[in-house]
């Protein structure tokens, strides 16, 4: 077991007879943070009607229907586990989890069960429940999904019907058929095809028209033209009883194109459903002073000017000015660094940061909307609109293709009107139909879908639209430092022994001290077995710890604090590390140097990137010289230090202004604006919630090599797309002249079109199958 | 062959009913989550006996 949390969950799962979960899950869950009782208590605020009314409905028979958004759902087995666990709670009428939207709909009887207990139960399973706010974006996405499915379904039914009529018609062409029956079959084909064109293919017409009005030729234009003209020609043929009908091609084309787009969108939306919401990092309850007593209230009811209590170890819920007390605050939300900042009375602390050492009393400055965290959220939203749109390869080719096809068709029509005027219309139409860009239109979605599912299996979740295409054309690869190139946690890298105790004893003693600390330093010692118990432990906020061990007083902490006890303590060694001193009343014992370890694969990844011609850079919020040392070790030339989230964003923007294509690799909340700005972005998810990252690619297992492998995959995907285009265009170049000369019967056109599309799909599937070197 | 004049319209009526049912099912949300439904059939087993007992105790605790 990796942590007590997992153990508790595993115990709960096995104890309830639900261990089938482990057989059925298809992806590993995110690591849960240790579930503590106080976290459970936080959910009690949801029992208040004022807050729960926002996401609950009470029906006439007294049952409450609540909608929760779940963080950390990865696969279908999770939904099963949650549904099974909840539906066994007394009072729960029904529990339904929607994996696609990460949403839980639960109906329960409020007299038997409180809402907070449902929250706590879900939390105990290791998922993070939140109220589901029905945002317009989310509703729109669901509406689009259903509309896509409806169009696809109708096209599918239509395809089957028209296909049956087409078999009869083609057989009739070969064997001979009375014209009244041919007319009958054609009329019914016309009826069904017209409905499909109107209902299912209407989306192509409206998109093409929308872009045409703006002067852009997009892929939907040749699609709409082909469908529209083939339908019109066939309708004309049906009405006059002459020529050929192409209803089967029209409907089949519509169906396959809709299918390709539906699958592509499904892959993309799967993880796009969780929106960036910085607020989700904040606790729901705050402790604030009302009428002289401390009470726990929903965070949203807090107003500026109120007295709040910020407990040690908790996330600060609101921007506030410290009134009494002093502590240190970890601000990785804003600067990505894990070493805390010291705060005293009069200093400002920010929502979303963590109070490390001691309780503080502070005055809230205002509501969430005025906070620095909300500004970060707005910065992310701004970046999404400011981000330059790269023209899609398909659309660039489409504009040439449309122009070409229209030119050839007009030329054919003019030529034939000279040779045989009565045939000119039919030949020109057959050119248009045979140039039907089915394969061309499928080329990109098929390849992207295939690449995305291959990446997903290797632990990279693809969220961003067109990110693979942007990644394959990237010129700059930028990294964040802490948590991305480094592990993001302190480890002991150097121990300078000063006294008589040897290194092992010093570290064991230090570990014993750090058991009683919640400063981020303590994690560096968590793997060392502490020596015997310390007595009379005192935590000196902002300085260190003091304790009695075997009758002697020991201190561990800052230089100044230890020198008070042992004046002969020398200065720390001249290496840029985070130094902690250990001494006793009689003698200094050691300097322990801590640093954030570089990820072992980082050097290799950067090496590969620079050797494939990418400009590699480092953007970090850290101002210490360690950034320079790290960059030198890894061979990064370009280093920018002390960068705030907005500075990073502006730097990327300035690169993009020089028409560079930028890929950013980052982690955590502080990188969210720059990740949204970059053309393609990676987030090393590690401990960070999916909902809090804004990247196109999420590296779920924290292995940086995924950057290289995804880059390779993107390049290969681009190659496959180009091959697909080459084939589709080549086929057209070959078939159009034949059609222009009047040699292509409709059945040959239909077979050619289907085979051409099939080839494109099969070629794209190679991306999924090629051996990949993820863990080389 | 004249039967075609009757049979084809009948086939189209069936087709229309099929489409109507499909659209109803989509609007009803039955296709909203295609991933989970694929698993549901495998997950329908009743949980084991031990699980039932724990569950009863738990829900009693929860009521308190």
Image (spheres, helix red, strand yellow):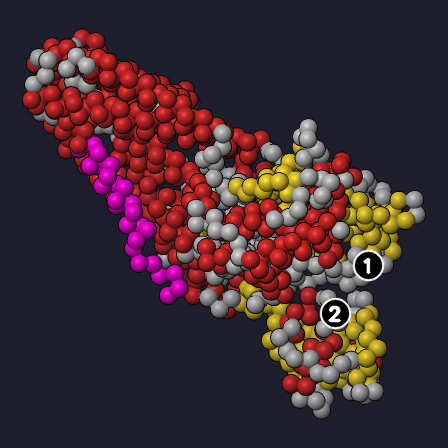
Q: Is mark 2 on a helix, strand or loop?
A: loop
Would you identify the image quadrant in which residue A17 lies? bottom right
- A553 displayed left or right of A82: right
Q: Where is residue A2 in the image (x, y as percent from the top left)?
A: 57, 67
The circle drawn on residue A359 is 1
Q: What element carries label 1?
A: loop
- A539 displayed left or right of A468: right
User: Chain under label 1?
Assistant: A
**Residue range (magenta):** A752-776
Q: Residue at x 44, y 40 (%)?
A: B34
Q: Quadrant of the N terminus of chain A?
A: bottom right
User: Chain under label 2?
Assistant: A
Q: Main secondary structure of the magenta part?
A: helix
Q: Position of residue A478 (x, y in %)?
A: 50, 54
- A443 displayed left or right of A56: left
Q: Residue at x 92, y 47 (%)?
A: A292
Would you identify the image quadrant in which residue A449 lies? top left
The verdict on residue A513 being magenta is no
- Residue beneath disc 2: A517
């Amino acid at each position: 077991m990796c942590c007590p949390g997992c153990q508790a969950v595993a115990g709960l799962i096995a104890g309830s007879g639900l261990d089938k979960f482990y057989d059925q899950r298809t992806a590993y869950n995110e690591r849960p943070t240790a579930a503590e009782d106080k976290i459970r208590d936080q959910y009690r605020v949801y029992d208040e009607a004022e807050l729960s009314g926002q996401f609950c409905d009470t029906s006439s028979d007294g049952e409450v229907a609540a909608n929760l958004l779940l963080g950390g759902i990865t696969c279908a087995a999770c939904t099963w586990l949650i549904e099974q666990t909840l539906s066994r709670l007394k009072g729960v009428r029904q529990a339904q989890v929607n994996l696609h939207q990460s949403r839980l709909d639960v109906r329960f009887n409020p007299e038997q069960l409180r809402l907070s207990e449902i929250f706590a139960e879900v939390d105990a399973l290791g998922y993070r429940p939140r109220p589901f706010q029905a945002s317009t974006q989310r509703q729109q996405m669901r509406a689009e999904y259903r509309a896509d499915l409806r169009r696809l379904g109708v096209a599918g039914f239509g395809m089957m019907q028209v296909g049956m009529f087409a078999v009869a018609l083609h057989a009739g062409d070969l064997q001979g058929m009375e014209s009244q029956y041919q007319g009958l079959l054609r009329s019914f084909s016309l009826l069904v095809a017209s409905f499909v064109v109107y209902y299912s293919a209407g989306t192509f017409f409206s998109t093409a028209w929308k872009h045409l009005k703006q002067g852009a030729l997009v892929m939907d234009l040749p699609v709409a033209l082909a469908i529209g003209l083939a339908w019109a020609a066939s309708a004309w043929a049906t009405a006059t009883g002459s020529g050929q009908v192409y209803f089967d091609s029209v409907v089949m084309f519509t169906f396959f194109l809709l299918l390709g787009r539906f699958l592509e969108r499904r892959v993309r939306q799967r993880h796009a459903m969780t929106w960036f919401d910085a607020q989700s990092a904040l606790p729901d309850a705050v402790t604030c002073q009302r009428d002289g007593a401390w009470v726990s209230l929903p965070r949203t009811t807090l107003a500026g000017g109120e007295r709040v209590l910020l407990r040690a170890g908790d996330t600060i819920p609101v921007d506030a000015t410290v009134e009494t007390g002093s502590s240190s605050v970890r601000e990785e939300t804003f600067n990505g660094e894990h070493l805390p900042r010291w705060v005293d009375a009069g200093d400002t602390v920010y929502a979303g940061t963590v109070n490390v050492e001691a309780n503080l009393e502070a005055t809230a400055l205002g509501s969430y909307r005025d906070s620095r965290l909300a500004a970060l959220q707005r910065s992310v939203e701004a970046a999404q609109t400011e981000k330059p749109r790269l023209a899609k390869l398909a659309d660039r080719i489409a504009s040439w293709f449309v122009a070409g096809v229209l030119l050839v068709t007009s030329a054919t029509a003019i030529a034939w009107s000279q040779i045989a005027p009565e045939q000119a219309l039919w030949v020109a139409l057959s050119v248009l139909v045979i140039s039907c860009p089915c394969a061309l239109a499928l080329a990109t979605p098929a390849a992207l879908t295939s690449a995305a599912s291959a990446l997903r299996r290797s632990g990279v979740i693809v969220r961003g639209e067109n990110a693979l295409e942007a990644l394959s054309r990237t010129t700059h690869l930028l990294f964040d430092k802490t948590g991305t190139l480094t592990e993001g946690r302190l480890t002991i890298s150097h121990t300078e022994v000063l006294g008589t105790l040897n290194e092992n004893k010093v570290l064991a003693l230090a570990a014993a001290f750090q058991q009683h600390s919640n400063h981020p330093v303590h994690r560096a010692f968590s793997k060392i077995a502490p020596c015997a118990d310390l007595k009379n432990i005192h935590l000196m906020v902002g300085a260190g710890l003091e304790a009695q061990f075997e009758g002697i007083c020991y201190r561990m902490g800052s230089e100044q604090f230890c020198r008070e006890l042992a004046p002969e303590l020398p200065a720390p060694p001249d290496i840029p590390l985070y130094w902690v001193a250990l001494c006793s009343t009689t003698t200094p014992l050691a300097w322990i140097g801590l640093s954030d370890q570089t990820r072992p694969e980082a050097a290799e990844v950067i090496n590969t990137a620079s050797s494939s011609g990418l400009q590699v850079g480092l953007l970090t919020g850290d101002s210490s010289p360690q950034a320079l040392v790290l960059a030198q070790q890894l061979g990064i030339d370009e280093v920018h230090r002390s960068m705030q989230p907005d500075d990073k964003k502006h730097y990327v923007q300035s690169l993009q202004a020089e028409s560079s294509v930028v890929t950013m690799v980052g982690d955590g909340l502080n990188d969210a604006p720059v990740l949204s700005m970059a053309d393609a972005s990676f987030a090393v998810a590690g401990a960070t919630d999916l909902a809090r990252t804004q990247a196109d690619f999420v590296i779920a297992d924290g292995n940086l090599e995924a950057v290289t492998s995804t880059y390779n995959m993107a390049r290969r995907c681009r190659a496959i797309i180009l091959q697909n285009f080459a084939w589709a265009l080549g086929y057209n170049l070959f078939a159009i002249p034949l059609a222009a000369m009047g040699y292509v019967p409709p059945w040959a056109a239909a077979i050619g079109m289907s085979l051409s599309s099939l080839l494109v799909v099969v070629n794209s599937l190679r991306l999924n199958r090629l051996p990949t070197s993820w863990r080389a | 062959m004249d039967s075609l004049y009757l049979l084809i319209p009948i086939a189209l009526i069936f087709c229309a009913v099929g489409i109507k049912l499909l659209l109803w099912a989509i609007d009803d949300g039955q296709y909203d989550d295609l991933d989970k439904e694929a698993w549901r059939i495998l997950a329908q087993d009743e949980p084991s006996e031990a699980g039932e007992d724990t569950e009863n105790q738990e829900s009693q605790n929860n009521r308190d």
